[in-house]
Amino acid sequence: MAHSAAVATPPPKGKASKRRSATPRRLPYLLIAPAGLLMLGFIAYPVISVFYYSLQNYNVTKPWRNGFAGFDNFTRIFTEDELFWPSLGFSAQWVIVQVTLQLALGLALALIVNQTFIGRGISRAMVFSPWAVSGVLTSTIWILLYNSSTGFSRYLADAGIGEYGTSVLSDTGTVFWAATLAELWRGVPFFAILILADLQSVSKELYEAASVDGAGRMRQFFHITLPHLRDAIILATLLRGVWEFNNVDLLYTLTGGGPAGETTTLPLYVANTGIEGHDFGYASALTTVAFVILLFCSIVYLRLSKFGGDNK
Amino acid sequence: MTAALVEKKDARTPGPSGGNDLPPPSSHRRTKRERAFDDVPRWQIYLPLGIYLLFTLIPFYWMFLFAVRPAGSTSLVPWPMTGEHFNKVWNERSFAIFFQNSMLVGVATLIATTLVALAGGYALARFNFRIKGAFMLALLCSQFIPGALMLVPLFEIFKNLQMINSLGSVVIAETVFQLPLSIILISGFIKNVPISLEEAAWVDGCSRFKAFRTVVLPLLRPGLIAVGSFAFVHSWNHFLFALMFLSEQDKQTIPVGLNTLIGADSVDLGALAAGGVIAAVPVVIVFAFIQKWLITGFSAGAVKG
C-alpha cells in the first residue's frame, strides 16, 4: 500500500513556514479523528460493554440477581440452552443457501447483462432494482404475494394449480423456501452489480486470443472470466455471508422467527432474549459467542480460499 | 490481505472513471471468428433475462396492483384505480410524518457520512502515519459486528445522552455503521487520482485544502455519488435502530410504520401495499439516477478494499 500513499507535502509558503513541520504530521490524525471518535464511542464501547456484560448476571426484571457471574452464561449456552443449537443450525443453513444461490444467480445475471444487446440499459436498471429495497419492504411485498386469500396461490388455484387457502408462511414445510425466495429476490442484484463491475476490467484481447486459439465459450469462461473474478467473488461472498448472518430485518418482519421457531436465526434469538426477555447478561454472552463464531469462520474462509493469492 | 489486493489492481484501473473503457471502434472488417465470440445467440440472452425480469417485476407489480385497486377487488389489472389506500396510510396512519422523518434521517446521514468519510479516506489515501494499520484493521473488523446485537448497549448510550426519541440518535447510529465501508471506498477513489495533479496545484500556490477542493473533489464525483446514495438508501431502509430508539409515534420512520401495518391484528392489505409504494418511491428514484454510476463506482473503488 505504501507506494500509493506517497508522503508529499505542499511547499511551504513564506508566511506559513511554521506549518511545514507541524501540519503534515498532525493532519492525518485530525482527518481521521471524527471517524475514529465516532467509532470508538458507538462501536468499540458497545462491543466492550457486551463482552463485560457477558460475564455478568444482568436482567432488568430480576435486579436482585445482578452481579458477577463468571462463565455461568457461557456454560448455560452450551449445556442447558435448548434454543441455541437449533438457531445456530438454522443460521448456518440460511447463510449457506442464500450465499450459494445468490452467487450462482448473480453471476449468471451479470454475464447476461454484460453482453451487448438491445434494451441493455433498461434491463440492467430493472433487474438491479430490488437491491435498493429494504428488508421490511421485501417482507411487505412478499406478504402480499404469499397471503392465502388474495395472494399468488389463489390465482394459481383459480387456474387449477394447487389448493385454495395455502399459506406458505405458516407451514413448517414451506416456510424456509418461501423466506429464501423473498431474500433471493433482493439479494441477487448485490452479487450481479459487484460481478458486473469487475467484468468491466477483463481485457477483451484475452477473449479474442482465446477465440482465435479455438477455445469455446465454456472454456473462455472457466479459464479467463472466472479466474479474473476470483477475488471479487471471495470478497463478495464473505461480506454477504456476514451480512446474511447478522441481518434480521426480513425474517423478523416476514416470519417473526416462526412458525414454531422454525426460522429463528441466532441474532434473532439474541434480539428476543435481550429486548423482549430483558436478559441482557445472557444476550451479551450469546452475542459474544456469535461474534467469535463469525470471526473464526471468516478467517478460515479467507485462508481456504487463498484470498489475494498470486495464482491468478 | 487488503494491501496485496490494492497493489495488484491499482495497476490495472487507469483513472477515477474506472475501467469502463470500450475498445476504439475498429476500422477493419471483423473476421468470422471475432463475430462468433461477440455474438451470443440472441435467445440465449433474451430467454433467461426475460424469466429473471418476470421474477423481479411481478412482486413490484403485485404491490402496485394491491395499492391502487379498490378494497375487495380481485382484478389483475390496475383499473379502475383508486387513491383510497394512499389517502388512508398518508393521513390516518401518519405516513406523511414518517416520510418526513425518514427524509430528514436519510439526508442527515448522507451528509454526515460523506464528510466524515472524505476526511478519513483522504488521510488513508495520502499519508503514512503510525496508527494507519490499526485504523485499517478496525475498519475491516467493524464489518463483522452485527448492528442488531449492539442494540442494547447503544440504547443505553443514547439514554445516557438523553437522545432517545430524537432523530439524532438514529442519524448517529446509521452514520457510524455506514462509515467503515464508506471510508474504504472513498480512499480507493482518492488513490486513483494521481498525486501529481495535487502537487501541480501546490506548486501553483494552492493550499492543501484548496488543491483538494479544486482538483481532487471534481474527479471524485462518481465515487461520492455511490457512497452518498449508499448512505441514503441504507438509512432510508434500516429498521432496527429506528424501532428501538424512537418510541413516540410522531418520531417514527417509514420502515417502522410498515412493520406496524404488517403486525396489525387484521392486516389491511390495501393499506400495506400503499405504504410499501410510498416506501419504495424515493429509493427507486435514487436508484434510477445512480444506477450507471454504481457500476463505474464499484469497478473503480469497491472491490479493491
Image (cartoon, coloured by chain):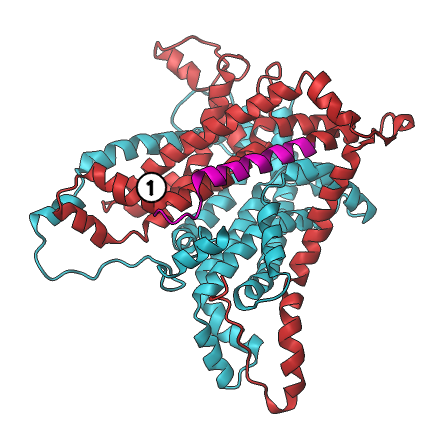
**Residue B287 on image: x %, y %:** 45, 47
**Colour chain B is painted in:** cyan
With A191 as the anchor, is A273 left or right in this view?
right
- Which tint is chain A? red
- Does A180 sit left or right of B236 as displayed? left
- Horizontal and vertical percent for residue B206? 53, 82
Q: Residues within 10 Å of mark 1 (few under 14, many from 20)?
A: many
In this rendering, position of residue A102 left or right of residue A281: left
Q: Position of residue A106 (x, y in %)?
A: 38, 37
Q: Secondary structure at mark 1?
A: helix
Q: Does residue B294 appear in this view?
A: yes
Quarter of the view holding residue B296: bottom left
Tell me which amino acid carries mark 1. Ala
**What secondary structure characterizes most of the magenta part?**
helix
Can you identify the residue that label 1 sits on? Answer: A110
Look at the picture and state if A3 lies above or below B137: below
Give the number of callouts: 1
Q: Is residue B213 magenta?
A: no
Q: Position of residue B228 (x, y in %)?
A: 53, 55
A288 part of magenta stretch: yes
Q: Disc 1 sits on a residue from what chain?
A: A
- Report the span colored magenta: A287-312
Q: Which residue lies at the image location 78% right of the left edge and 31% below the top edge? A: A280
Residue at 37% across / 33% down in the picture?
Answer: A104
Q: Residue at x 51, y 52 (%)?
A: B229
